Amino acid sequence: MPFVPHTKTDERVMLDAIGVGSIEALFDEIPAELRNGQLVETPTGLSEMSMLRVMSERANQDVIGLSFLGAGAYEHHIPSAVWDLASRGEFLTAYTPYQAEASQGTLQLIYEFQTMMCRLTAMDVSNASVYDGATAMAEAILMAVRANKKSKSKRLLCAGNIHPHYLEACRSIVSNQNIEFEVIPYRDDTGTLDLEYLDTRLSEDFAAMVIAYPNFFGGLEEVDHLTDWAHENSMLVVGVVNPMALGILGPPGEWGEQGADIVVGEAQPFGIPIASGGPYLGYMCCKKTIVRQMPGRIIGRTIDLDGREGFALTLQAREQHIRRAKATSNICTNQGLLVTAATIYLSLLGDNGIHAVASRCHTNMMLLLDKLTQIPGVRLRFDGPVFHEAVVQLPTSAKTILQKVAAENILGGYDLVEVDEGLSDCMLCCVTETKNDEDLSVLTSALAKAIGGHSADL
Amino acid sequence: MAEFPGELHYLESHEWARVEEDGSVTVGISDHAQDELGDVVFVELPEIDSEVIAKQEAGVVESVKAASDIYAPVSGTVIAINDKLEEEPEIVNDSPYDDGWFFKISPTDLDELKSLLSAAEYKESCEDDAH
Amino acid sequence: MLIFEMGSEGRNATAQFEEPTEVSDIPARHLRGCRAGLPEVSELQVVRHFTNLSKKNFSIDGQFYPLGSCTMKYNPRGAHRAASLPGFLNRHPLAPEQFSQGFMACLFELQEYLKDVTGMQAVSLTPMAGAQGEFAGVAMIRAYHDSQADSARSEILIPSAAHGTNPATAVMCGYTVREIPVTSDGDVDIDALKGAVGPQTAGLMMTNPSTCGVFDRRIQEIADIVHGVGGLLYYDGANLNAILGKVKPGDMGFDVLHMNLHKTFATPHGGGGPGSGPVGVNDRLSPFVPTPVVQRRDDGTYFWADRDQLPLSIGRLSAFMGNAGILLRAYAYARLLGREGIHRVGEYATLNANYMAARLAEAGFQLAYPNRRATHEFIVTLAKEAKELNVTAMDVAKRLLDYGYHAPTTYFPLLIAECLLIEPTETESREEIDGFVDAMISILEEAHRTPELVSAAPHTMPVKRLDDVKAARDLDLAFEGS
């Protein structure tokens, strides 16, 4: 009976106190024909040792050697202190800080997280996080439609080079509210948004423009121009931004004349393992003027009865447990544990550290591209600057090549046929600070061999 | 005890309306409503020149524990808003019928006021709620 | 003290990064002009700061945490360790199938166990929290009606005791909400329900046992009424722990449900998340489940079923596979408990709640539903104390903190005045429950003798009661100093 501490004596004493003869009698209000919870498919229980053995065997099946996959989930060094601290029971097994006096640890930590995200993005306010980058984008879209009082429209302009899974998730989440997306195409030569296309949509009313930075292909958009254009046309600007890139790239709060209005994204790069895609950390920042349209929990600094500094949930009247059908969102969780990890991570790195990590990611990417483009038939698919990911064009289908290098226990990149059939000979490669020169050479040799082998097949 | 000034018209949703000498209608929330809400922390007002429709949402009043829509008592155009509430929402608690007014409407049809409650009727409706 | 206030310019946790490199090939207009203002502290300062912050938290590991409707049971360390195995932590979400079979096997089996536990025919694990599970469920109801060309259904019925997420979800799915009252004994008002259903009814969202801490005895009749007009029944799994291994929602007549694995399957709450809210459906709704789901081929290998296999799916709800790591913890928990352990969850959760309710009632506390059996939780109302002694439910909750117990849920459900919703869970011992009851008795005595002691509580926490009004009026949401 794992985790149920009752002895036979306990049980008898407790039943006597209640005044019933058996535990079964406690279920007597449930119609008898429903009392049939018999499990059939579930196996019998295991000791922790046996369970860990099963799980270890499973985990070992999935071990890979070297990975250059990014596409929204990024491998970075995670300082040992991050999860040592985040796994303390006081963080791990606490719940939502509704009892502020008994939750000052979590509350202060979230306030520090909000501060860090505001400073990185140069935005005024941050919430305590939402589920992941994709849902953060969906919430940002709903928020933009609510917040843009100048526009009556429920249509948006959305970058066509945003993570395709993000776009798909957003469609699932907002479509029942009759919100529509117009997708801005990307240029075939740069992979960045087609600015000329925008002028063809001048006469229409859109609530917001959604920009990815870096875009899905790793490239850097002309964010100043896009932001000013959107503002001139009464749209709000939503930036979907990899926050790690902000170690070297200009913050969205400074895009164009007025800066982005809402900035969201995936903060997984901040100390969170790639771990099959979750739990991750969707962050969400905005300008102060629209903070009341922001969903999710927000922590404020205040004072207690004695005038001492303290922290509490604030702006709760917008949330579902009070506002019910009129809430800004149905969300009630934030990714508290991951906020804890990210806050510790950013504290350890500081300005110098995040600059160092981001610059090393970028430099490693450039080194890899130098190496890969030495292979005959391999070229960089798009022109223009990138952060730590880029699209590499191969002489044949990416699928074939990636399978061949996978046979050598290397994940070479993401097959872009999943995104655009026209990119079936392209893969999206990512390099972070975790790779050294030897790793880059291993991938280069494996690819050269796979491509060479392919040529020989011809 | 909450005050229910006799010269005002009320909605069951706790807004009051006062017809001014120039024919405009001033809107606020009742003493009873501010008391129920507790400390008001934020008021969202309609924009000047916007159109409001009788008994439809025109703003929001927010306390720590609740957020309530504010309904327009009559249809018309918003001609003034009480800017002071933005910085000092507590005025709603201190002076619900005077300094704590929300906005003024230039009404399209003053007859709409006839469907509103009198002070006595509103007071009764508040007492019913309490049971 | 904030971490920002303990730094010094140029100080760093230098073991955690290597020298920066020069960025020469990105045009200057893209580059960051000035530093962001992150903390400048040493590694030891970081470790000490966050260790000390953690000590200001109540947690299951530290305290009894009888927070009603939140199922704060012990989170087995073994499950946490299992999910933290390097093969799982380092698996990329887009890794090819051949590098994912171990992970997918766990997910596939978890899907099977959850079907078993709920009596449903299909499960999708992707929703990342209860609220997202609700969203998926109601979106499937909508997709189902749309597939029947039945677009006149515009309304979701929700009992008035429901969680706030239910109406918020219905609105996110484009529905209007009609509340159904609850009778004085805590069950749904059947006559009101009969009067409310019609061709406009898309479905009913319901928690059973309800948030009133009682099992709705007429659930089959409710199901028949809603099905009778062509509506579907949504089961909010918030209280599944009460009936785990005893009753299956599928048998009650529900068409679709979500489970809160962070409650029922003991995954850690992490200070507010992550959660995990898988959905289960019957055959009628199985074509619509959110993607991806794991399926098994005849040769025993696993693959991701996506749009290609599920063209009617409501689609993707996350960038990848929901809160995958939480699913692994829930799987490990299910393996530890096994069939026989799961059967006991509902039983002992119910035993603990009824025992505590009986002891509190004996001590003079007023139960909200004294004539009903408690389920896994129950409600105490302090309306009398509030009136006579001017000591509120919130005061008692705060005073409990001084006694070393986390407060129960206060002022929810909204139907009951001055209420405490108390859920002890099955993992608490009799001694712990007795200790809590003794504390309640002692606080009641204090309320009579020295009410100001209770109404000014807590006295022993790092802070006293906080000024919520100031927090909301003078918004300070990010530190502006350096």
Image: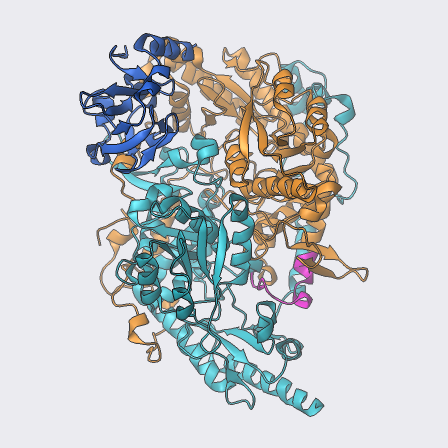
Palette colour of chain A: cyan
Q: Residue at x 38, y 47 (%)?
A: A127
Q: Nearer the viewer, residue C436 or A346?
A: A346
Q: Is residue C391 above or below residue A417?
A: above
Chain for colour blue: B
Residue A147 placed where, x, y %? 36, 45
Residue A66 placed where, x, y %? 57, 74
Q: Is residue C240 above or below residue A236?
A: above
- State the quadrant of the C terminus of chain C: bottom left
Palette colour of chain C: orange
Q: Can I make out residue A275 in this image?
A: yes
Magenta stretch: residue C376 in it?
Answer: no
Q: Which residues are magenta?
A: C89-105
Left or right, B82 with reference to A198? left
Left or right, C88 with reference to A121? right
Magenta stretch: residue C100 in it?
Answer: yes
Left or right, C70 with reference to A114? right
Color scheme of the displayed model: by chain
